[in-house]
Image (spheres, rainbow, N blue to C red):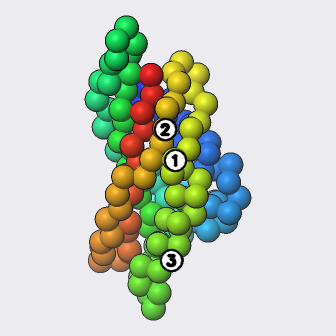
Amino acid sequence: MSATWEIQKAIYSALSGNSTFMDAIGNRLYDEPPVNLAYPYTVIGDVTEISDNRLYETGFEDTITLHIYTKPGSLGFKEAKQILEKMNDVLNLKVFDLTSYTMLICKFENAMSFRDEDKRIISVRYRVIAN
C-alpha cells in the first residue's frame, strides 16, 4: 500500500490546472521530460515515502521533489525563483482530493538552487501527509 501515485497525480493536477503557473513554464510540466526541451520547464521528480500510521489508521508522509529548470543568462536565478513563488501559491499549505486517502496537508519544505553547465535548477521539496 502506497499513496505516492495518488499524491503525484494530485500535485500534477493542481499545477497543470493553474494557468498562472503553466504560463510561467510555457505549459511544460513533466514526469519524464522529452529530450531537448525549451526552457523553462518543471519536472516532478523523486518521491520518498515513510509510514505515518496512527491508532487503527494507515498513514503516509511523502516528500516529493519538483525541479524547475531555466536557461542561464542575465537573469541568473530570478526566473526560477519567480516560478517557485507561483508553485508555492498553488501547493503550499493546500489540501488536494485523493481517491483512496485523505490528504491532511501539502507544505513547502525547502528549496535548493544550483547551476548546471547549461541550465539553472531549483530543486523544491514538499512534504505531503495523508491517511
Q: Amino acid at mark 1?
A: Leu
Q: Amino acid at mark 2?
A: Ile
Percent of width and height locating residue 1: 38, 16
Q: Residue at x 38, y 74 (%)?
A: 120
In this view, the residue in front, 96 or 29, is: 96
The residue furthest top is: 56
Percent of width and height locating residue 126: 41, 48
Tell me the crowding category of disc 1: few under 14, some 14 to 19, or many 20 or more residues within 10 angstroms, Cα based.
Answer: some
The residue furthest front is: 55
The answer to the question of whether label 2 and label 3 lie on touching residues, with beta carbons closer than 8 A, is no
Quarter holding residue 95: top right
Dot 3: what SS?
helix
Residue 79, numbered circle: 3
The answer to the question of whether label 3 and label 1 lie on touching residues, with beta carbons closer than 8 A, is no
In this view, the residue in front, 70 or 103, is: 103
Percent of width and height locating residue 83: 53, 68
2 or 3: mark nearer the eye = 2
Residue 93, numbered circle: 1
The residue that mark 2 highlights is: 105
The residue furthest bottom is: 74
**In this view, 114 is above or below 56:** below
Quarter holding residue 112: bottom left
Q: How many numbered discs sit on the rendered protein?
A: 3
Dot 2: what SS?
strand
Percent of width and height locating residue 40: 52, 69
Gap between marks 2 and 3, in whole Å?
Answer: 27 Å
Left or right: residue 16 versus residue 58 is right
Gap between marks 1 and 2, in whole Å?
Answer: 6 Å
Lower sequence index among marks 3 and 1: 3
